[in-house]
Image (spheres, rainbow, N blue to C red):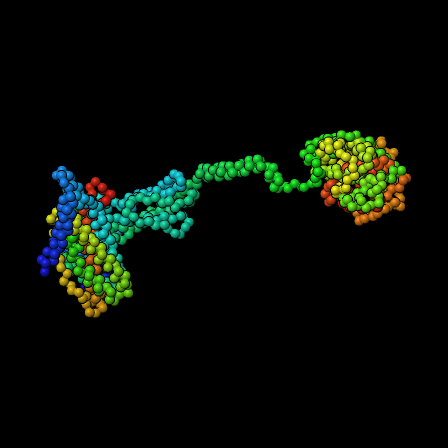
Amino acid sequence: MQQKSEKRQLGQRRNRLRTCRTDKRTMAQRRISGGKLFITVVYLVAMCRAVPVNDLLDRASQRSDKMHSLSTLLTQEMDSHFPPYGRMQMPRPADCHTSALQTPNDKEQALQVSESDLMSLARSLLQAWVDPLAVLSTSAITLPHPSKSSISSKIQELQEHSKSLGDGLDILSGKMGPSAQAISFLPYTGGTDLGQDRVTILNKFNFLLSCLRRDSHKIDSFLKVLRCRAAKLQPELC
Amino acid sequence: GPEWELAFIICFPRKFDCRSREKETFSCWWEPGSDGGLPTEYRLFYTQEREVRECPDYVSAGANSCFFDKKHTSIWAEYTMTVVATNALGNASEEFRITDVMEYVKPDPPVNVTVVVNSSAPSPFLEIRWKSPPDVDVRTGWVTLKYELRVKQNDSKEWKVNIGSETFFNFYNVYPGLLYMVQVRCKLDHGKWSEWSNTIFAEIPKNHQLEKYFWIFVFVFSLVPFLMAMYIVLLKRNAVKQCLLPPVPGPKIKGLNAHLLKSGRSEDVVNALMGNQNFPPVAAWTEQVEDFLLVSDSDEWLLTDSFASEKNKDIFIIPAGLHLGLEIQRRDLSVDLNTWEKTDDSKEEAKSNFSNMEPINLPVEKHEFLNGEEKSIQPLASTSYVDIQQHPTLTDYSRVKEVNDNTILILNEEEIPHGLDAEEVKSEVSVPDDYSRVKEVNSDVVFLEKGDSADGCCKKKEDHYTDWTNQKPIMPLESELSKGFCLKMIASGYVDSGPAFSVK
């Protein structure tokens, strides 16, 4: 099952690349002379790379920042009405479904990781939350919480940002090499149902949101380090 | 026992708090419990899922604290802290869990906040600059700082707030002469806000120079249209005068030019009216002369009146010398020459006589018209008369014998009007002192019929001419008579001379 979804992703990527190449061929066929053909090819290659990497990274990090902001607000909103269980009873972050992924935990480590690895980590984490977000989205509608409508809308927004960020990172990773395109598979095994009773549902919801907050922060931090590293001539981007 | 006492001491959860200033290090503090007076040692042990370690630094963060430096700090990792209190009685411990150091991130406030008033045109504004808090690394992208700035007037309660990522801000909503307060704070990676920085004060100077320029500008700009308006008014002053002070329409005498009247000398005026003739001096009222002047404005009267056939019918005209005490400037009076009526020769004489009189401010066109005019009796065109202003005017009313409301004119024979040729007239003045000759009285005028004896001054009545002009019937007349002049009566005729003869 893992391989199927991976193959699907690779196929999608190939299709995108194919369309790019096909465009090149059809346009190139219109040219007659060889010299003009060469110039045209160069021109088209440049067009395929019209948007500079720095700009793409900037946009990507803005999205991840928005995602992190939303998830922070969500946890605060949950806590405002239902204080957490108590620090001792809270599920531990090691229980998050993404805890298996090895990530840098401080600045020095993060600055030593290569760009491709940083990109790969970000994409892996992002991919790992596609399914859980869907579960959260369906559960939020019937959540036994006074602010459930606000929570539900924020989760929907999170999903949209996640989708567009994923697309953007796909394009970016395509420019960065194969190691950037590798994704670690982190499946969500929590199932579609959060629980039967109110307390269980709320606890699970809370736990998922805290995991989401941490992972969105990781994604945001890695992308911003990437952005700063790529824009060496533009320190204001850091 | 002692175990129980110790357990009691540490049994309750103590406050435990941590803080990270820059997402690289963090510190934790615990509240010491009551130690019963015994010296107690506190130790902190932490674990990150594997081995248990002891706090690396009990000092840097103060008393009852533990400082974790960069090597010992892991973000997104869980810490389980155990605080152990040990004294002579034993030890007790308390456990605290930190799920994520990021939950405790709270930076220091921004530093080097400067506020400069920029007074450049068109209006002053505040240039606010600051720097990121120390120890926060903004160069590698590991940390994202967001700043919040707030400005308010010193005496206002509302803050104007701005959030951004830059380390500068230009605040334009300022007014001269006011004092403003500025504060800045920052946030790290959507964590907690820092404390506000120290308040910076800035005062906008009152820009007197700008005010001066402003008023000069206003003055110049209001002066220009004013000057233009004055210039236009000056150019069109005649039109303006016409508009504001509409001229009083005055009488017009056919054939006379008003300009001549205005500009002409009295002699010219008189000549214009009557031609260049020399009138004989005003003759005294002679009793023998019993001429009647018919004054009328219609032909019918002339034809039907029994007197009309009389040869020596004269149309009575107020003698020129009759001073009515008017000091009215007659500008627009013009003489209707058609009203002259006289006999053949006497007319000329009278005319010349008339012309010898004192200057008359009669606005008469200098016209040779009279010279060539036929001496024919012509119907009266109108019955208004002209006031003849003499120089000097007679203001002495002592000569008036009697005035009643029927506007009887009574002559005083003793005095001679100034305006006349006094010597000639003096002898001819007589006073009508009986009313037996009153022929007719109408509302405005009493017409006296002078007998043969009474009228010395009317002796040469043909010599007397009065200019009488068409004038506005509303011309007020003062009831001042000068002697030496008499009223010629109209025999039985009707004189539509109400206004002309009104004496008030």
Which quarter of the figure has residue A41? Answer: top left
Residue B464, percent from left and from top: 82, 36
Mark yes or no: residue B350 visible: no
Residue B439, percent from left and from top: 85, 46
- Furthest toward the right, the residue is B453
Q: Nearer the viewer, residue B268 or A153?
A: B268
Q: Is residue B416 left or right of residue B120?
A: right
Q: Residue at x 17, y 51 (%)?
A: A169
Q: Residue at x 34, y 50 (%)?
A: B161
Which quarter of the figure has residue B320? Answer: top right
Q: Is residue A222 left or right of residue B457?
A: left
Q: Nearer the viewer, residue B1 or A199?
A: A199
Residue B195, percent from left and from top: 30, 50
Total numbered circles: 0
Question: Which quadrant of the figure contains the C terminus of chain A?
Answer: top left
Q: Residue at x 80, y 44 (%)?
A: B303
Residue B57 sits above or below residue B316 on the image: below
Q: Is residue A16 left or right of residue B349?
A: left
Residue A168, percent from left and from top: 19, 51
Question: Which quadrant of the figure contains the N terminus of chain A?
Answer: bottom left
Mark yes or no: residue B157 visible: yes
Residue B132 sits above or below residue B44 on the image: above
Q: Residue at x 22, y 46 (%)?
A: A55
Q: Nearer the viewer, residue B350 or B24?
A: B350
